Image (spheres, helix red, strand yellow):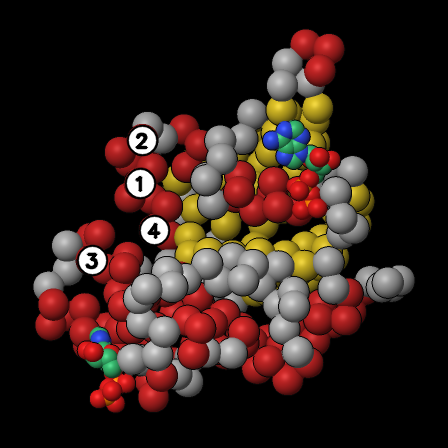
Amino acid sequence: MIELVNLTKTFGSGKTATTVLDDISFTVDAREILAVVGPSGAGKSTLARCLNLLERPTSGQVIVGGEDLTAMGAARLRDARRRIGTVFQSASLLSRRTAAENVALPLEYLGATKASTRARVGELLDRVGLLDKAGHYPHQLSGGQRQRVGIARALALTPSVLLSDEATSGLDPDSTETYLRLLTELRDDLRLAVVFITHEMDTVVRVADTVGRIDGGRIVEHGAITDLVLDP
Ligand code: ADP
Ligand code: ADP
């Protein structure tokens, strides 16, 4: 599970300081999908980058597996960040690498052996239904397939948290449906805590267990999907 405690992010200082995230707190349990929804400019991508520590929050904590990632030095943080897998908008795969080679990247950085990497990559591509596309380059894949390769890469180091940052934006309805179904499967099979960030309200009702609505850098509403009245 992942817990955000009083997270704030301020850019700049003095008179030009802008508070983009203001006292954000929530918990996502294992086997839960929290959808974070909100309009453009609400702070969603800043939240995503603070949540996976690509960016240091100004204050507050990001707690995963009982450990506060914001309190860690660079070396420990590098290790701990493995517990959070991220799927980015438009997947951000390396274009000169095949699907299999993209999924292998995190394992290579870790120094895994060729044989174990190959086995693991096969397992991951199979899980996202793309084993037959292992040798395809990103431009030979559809947008939806690229996002599923992105999921496989995000899962390579067996994270407990999966962060999906606007990953269905720009996908057609069928690809979106496949992506959402995969997320719910992963939630159940791998007991992941999933943070699903989106501006698309119609995807939320199909995938979320809980919803946090963000506006002006604050969580203005948070609860079970069944309790929320969702006005697009
Ligand atoms: P969203 O993803 O919901 O569209 P963002 O997190 O991209 O929202 O942006 C939220 C607000 O934070 C915007 O008003 C944006 O201008 C501001 N912002 C984002 N990054 C920076 C930055 N590096 N410096 C100053 N302001 C920023
Ligand atoms: P083929 O072109 O023979 O049908 P694939 O499309 O299955 O082969 O794979 C093409 C490329 O992807 C090969 O270079 C292979 O090394 C690589 N590859 C396939 N499966 C895996 C895997 N499980 N792990 C790592 N690389 C793989």
**In this figure, which residue is indicated by the disc labeled 1?**
78
Please rate how many residues cluster around mark 1, counting C-alpha atoms within 10 Å: few if below 14, some from 14 to 19, many from 20. Answer: few
**In this figure, which residue is indicated by the disc labeled 2?**
74
Cα–Cα span, label 3 and label 4: 13 Å
Q: Earlier in the sequence, mark 3 or mark 4?
A: 4
Label 4, secondary structure: give it. helix
Place of residue 60 in the rendered image (x, y in percent of width and height, measured from the top left): 56, 30
Q: With 231 as the anchor, is 40 left or right in this view? A: left
Determine if the C-beta at disc 4 is less than 8 A from ligand 2.
no
Q: Return the residue found at the far bottom.
A: 132
Place of residue 171 in the rendered image (x, y in percent of width and height, measured from the top left): 63, 73
**In this picture, is 69 found above or below 123?**
above
Q: With 149 as the anchor, is 117 left or right in this view? A: left
Front position among marks 3 and 4: 3
**In this picture, is 59 found above or below 47?**
above
Image marks 2 and 1: residues in contact by CB distance under 8 Å? yes
What residue type is disc 1 on?
A: Arg
**In this figure, which residue is indicated by the disc labeled 3?**
108
Cα–Cα span, label 2 and label 1: 6 Å
Q: Return the residue found at the far top.
A: 14
Place of residue 191 in the rendered image (x, y in percent of width and height, measured from the top left): 45, 68
**In this figure, which residue is indicated by the disc labeled 4?**
82
Q: Earlier in the sequence, mark 3 or mark 1?
A: 1
